[in-house]
Each structure stands twice: as C-alpha cells, then as structure tokens.
C-alpha cells in the first residue's frame, strides 16, 4: 500500500474500510500520472495555473467536519451551537462557507469582524472575543448588532457600559471565565489556567464580581458562561474537567444570584493529526464526555456551544511549494529548499509544530531519502519539516505540506518582503481562486516617501 496515499487521505478517517475499498479510494485520490488529487482537482495543474506557494483548501472536508460535530451533538440529544473560531483562517470566502453551513463564527478583532461583515455573514451569529477590545471595536460590534460580546475583563465592562449608554442599545454578553484548568498542550496554546491573560478568574472572586456588574446592567443580557482551556488538545480529560467545573461554578453562582446560564460555551481546542505521532480525539469522543457530565449533573441542561477553529479548517488545507535549491552536507541530512517557509507557515518555528509532506507530482514513487525541508527566509529557524522521507526530488517538483489549513494563512507575514500566497478553494472537481497572490506593488502600497 502506498504510504503517501495513506498520508493524504489520513488513515484515521478510513479505519472502517477494508483493504479493497481503501485501495480504490487511494487510486481515486492519486491519479494515474501520480499527481496528488485534492477533492477531484489535480494539484499540479493548480500550481501551473496559480503559481506557488499556494494554499489549497478542500471545502468538502470543511463541510464534513462540521457535519461530524453536528451529528455528535445530535447523538447526545444536546441543544448546541457550533461557532467557527475564525482566527484559524479568516478570509471572506471561508465566512461565506460558514454562512452556507449555518454555523456561528467568532471573531477576535475589528479586522475579523469587518471581514465577516464584508462577506455578508449575519451579524447575529457572530461572537466577539478578545482580551483588550478597544472602544472603537466595541462601538463597531454594538452598531452592527453582533450576537454576543464575550466579556473578558473589568475595563471592557466599563467600556461597553459607556457604549451602550451612548447608543441606547442592548446586547447579549457572555462572561469568559478562567476555570483554573491547564490543558496538556504547548505552553503558548494553554489558556484555562489561573495564570492567564484571558478571562475572569474564578478562584479569586473576579468572576462573581463581574457577574454582579452584568446582572445589574439592564442593557446587557447575560447568555451564560464561556471558557476555553487551550488549543491542539488530544485527550477528553480536560474537556470532562471543564464541563464539571462549569457546572460547579454555575451552581455556586445560582445559589447566590439566582441565575442559571442559558448557554455554556466550552471553547475550542480539539486537536488534529499533523503527523503519525498525533492521535486526536474525535468529535463524538469529547461531545459524549461533555454530554454525560451535563446530563448527570444538571436539572436544566444549558445549550452547549463550542468554538472549533483548527479542527474545522486544519486538515482541509494543503500548502503547495516548488522545490528549488538543495544543500548536501557529507554525513548529515540534506536541506531541500522550497519557495515559501516561515512567512506562510510560522508554526514550526514558533511552536516546533511537526508537519508531513508529499511530492505532489511523484505520488507513485517510493521514498529514497530523508531530508530537511527548508524555507527561503533569512532565519536558520526557517525549517518547515525536519527528517521528511521523500522520493528522489528535482528542481521544480511540487511539494505539498499537509494539514496547513489552520493558523497558516491567518498568521502569514511579509518578512523579507515576500508577498503572501494566493488561496484556492476546491470542491468536487472545481477550483476557485478566493484570495489573490500579493504583488510587489501591494507590498509598497502603504509606504510613503521621505
Ligand atoms: N476559542 C477561543 C476563545 C480561542 O482562544 C481559540 C484559539 C479557539 C476557540 C479555537 O481553538 P482551536 O479549535 O483552533 O484550537 N496560533 C496557535 C493557536 C492559537 C489558538 C488561539 N485561540 C497555533 O497555531 O497553534
């Protein structure tokens, strides 16, 4: 069986199929001429048309993941809402996909809010997050009647009070709590522990004080509580503890304030598999754990909201590069360079994230060597993948890095004045350019003379 084919379709999605069916699916995905196919579209043809580096999103995968979340909730008979955490990938076209899928989105800045609104995304399905929303951002949110403002701190409560007073509007809010739970993930991806910049701390009484302020303000309609413990989490344990903690907090606050939340939002953070070592939980694993906790502990089960970002768009994304120079060092692994790198994917340099890649025009060739895939940026740390097994490569081959859909384009930058890549969506054999490649002109558009 072809190892590359397996990586591309991700064996974990297919463990239910027998080998015969699996082989058929692999043949389908890797066309006869050995090209990587992405939802029926030849990746090598995409490169010819749109150039490299190029982000490609398999939109069928995005829709399927949303379906998986939906059916997991429905299996547990829970009232729910899926809110796509758009920081993972925030361009107009993805907000339009979310609108078609009838999910909510959450935004964390005026810029994300602006993009969602420009895409025609309904404002009442937008939740506005952030630990330092400005007066201008809150005014923008209120003026556009966003669905919920996720209150994060006392300064924000004051600012929002001011905005509501001036505009004479009312708005739904939720309180972001810091429940005191550490997720087992990279330290930059932890948010639920007490020592965090996000949310109202429960232990020290901040959360109670915030609750009182909100309940006393008739222009703020409290929908419930929110907590997010971190990102790229693999086990169910953290979510189980979080569900228990949120119920405990709700009961405690109910006895004092006679308030029971209509919604409990448990954030996002569901891990995905970037490489063979990653073993993520499925949507139904954690939703059933959450469901059990709530059903056994609550008389009146609140609506459960989740905010997945990575798990919705991550596995759907591919970054296509052209292979250029190569450096062979006697006795050491060679460096094979591509025409992108940390500017389009900062995650390996920032979090030591591990990806896997395939040679998109040589899917039917076997691996012959192990190399480092390096980027073109002037940083020694600009290594996209260490120890990648590859077939024999040549200048001009197309390298596809897998699972790059989350926090790739959204964290892209112009270091070394490299333009940001284009983005193409593919679905059922059709491709559409949804974000143009930046040009050199674009790079100097904001520059003035001196
Ligand atoms: N909700 C809240 C309040 C969040 O802060 C986040 C992520 C999410 C939901 C979505 O988490 P996800 O399902 O995508 O894991 N740049 C980092 C990830 C930062 C995540 C920040 N917050 C990375 O590339 O790993």
Image (spheres, rainbow, N blue to C red):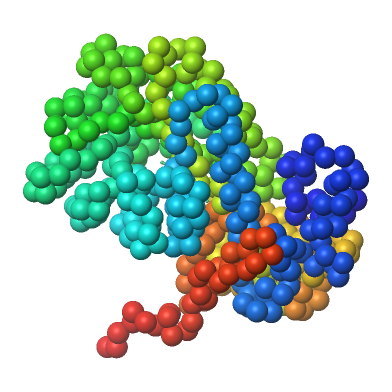
Q: Residue at x 43, y 85 (%)?
A: 441
Locate residue 148: give its quadrant.
Answer: top left
Question: As drawn, which residue projects farthest toward the left?
Answer: 166
In the image, residue 381 above or below residue 339: above
Q: Residue at x 31, y 14 (%)?
A: 252
**Front-most of 353 and 158?**
158
Q: Residue 14: horizontal and vertical position, in percent? A: 77, 42
Residue 311 makes an appearance in the image = no
**Does 357 sit left or right of 314 as displayed?**
right
**Front-most of 124 and 195?**
124
Q: Residue 356: horizontal and vertical position, in percent? A: 71, 55
Residue 214 makes an appearance in the image = yes
In the image, residue 92 above or below residue 350: below
Q: Residue 444: horizontal and vertical position, in percent? A: 39, 83
Q: Residue 277: horizontal and vertical position, in percent? A: 72, 42
**Front-most of 14 and 208?**
14
**Does 403 sit left or right of 98 as displayed?**
right
Q: Residue at x 69, y 37 (%)?
A: 279
**Does 102 sit left or right of 233 as displayed?**
left
In the image, residue 133 above or below residue 246: below
Locate residue 50: give its quadrant.
Answer: bottom right
In the image, residue 219 above or below residue 55: above
Q: Residue at x 32, y 24 (%)?
A: 261
Which of the image's four quarters has the C terminus? bottom left
**Does 316 sit left or right of 164 as displayed?**
right
């Amino acid at each position: 069986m072809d190892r590359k084919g397996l990586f591309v379709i991700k064996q974990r999605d297919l463990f239910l199929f027998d080998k015969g069916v699996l082989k058929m699916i692999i043949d389908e995905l890797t066309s006869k001429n050995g090209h990587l196919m992405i939802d029926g579209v030849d990746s090598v043809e995409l490169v010819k048309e749109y150039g490299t580096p190029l982000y490609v999103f398999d939109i069928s995968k995005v829709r399927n993941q949303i379906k998986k979340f939906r059916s997991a909730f429905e299996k547990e008979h829970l009232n729910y809402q899926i809110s796509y955490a758009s920081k993972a990938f925030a361009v107009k076209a993805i907000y339009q996909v979310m609108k078609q899928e009838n999910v909510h989105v959450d935004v964390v800045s005026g810029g994300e809010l602006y993009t969602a609104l420009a895409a025609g995304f309904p404002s009442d399905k937008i939740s506005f997050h952030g630990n330092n929303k400005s007066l201008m951002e809150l005014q923008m949110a209120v003026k556009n009647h966003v669905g919920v403002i996720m209150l994060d701190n006392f300064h924000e409560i004051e600012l929002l009070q001011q905005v509501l007073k001036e505009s004479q509007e009312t708005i739904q809010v939720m309180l972001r709590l810091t429940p005191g739970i550490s997720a087992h993930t990279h330290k930059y991806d932890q948010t639920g522990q007490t020592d965090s910049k996000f949310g109202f701390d429960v232990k020290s009484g901040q959360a109670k004080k915030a609750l009182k302020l909100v309940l006393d303000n008739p222009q703020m309609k409290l929908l419930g509580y929110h907590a997010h413990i971190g990102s790229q989490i693999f086990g169910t344990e953290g979510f189980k503890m979080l569900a228990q903690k949120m119920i405990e907090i709700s009961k405690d606050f109910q006895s004092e304030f006679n308030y029971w939340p209509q919604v409990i939002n448990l954030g996002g953070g569901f891990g995905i598999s970037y490489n063979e070592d990653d073993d993520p939980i499925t949507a139904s694993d954690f939703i059933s754990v959450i469901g059990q906790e709530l059903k056994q502990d609550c008389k009146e089960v609140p609506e459960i909201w989740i905010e997945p970002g990575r798990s919705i768009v991550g596995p759907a994304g591919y970054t296509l590069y052209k292979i250029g120079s190569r450096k062979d060092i006697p006795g050491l692994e060679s460096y094979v360079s591509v025409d992108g790198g940390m500017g389009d994917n900062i995650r390996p340099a920032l979090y030591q994230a591990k990806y896997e890649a395939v040679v998109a025009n040589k899917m039917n060739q076997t691996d012959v060597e192990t190399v480092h895939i390096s980027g073109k940026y002037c940083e020694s740390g600009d290594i996209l993948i260490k120890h990648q097994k590859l077939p024999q490569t040549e200048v001009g081959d197309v390298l596809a890095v897998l699972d790059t859909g989350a926090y790739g384009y959204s964290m892209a930058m112009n270091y070394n004045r490299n333009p940001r890549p284009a983005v193409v969506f593919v679905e059922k054999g059709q491709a559409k350019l949804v974000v143009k490649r930046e040009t050199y002109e674009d790079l100097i558009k904001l520059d003035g003379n001196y």
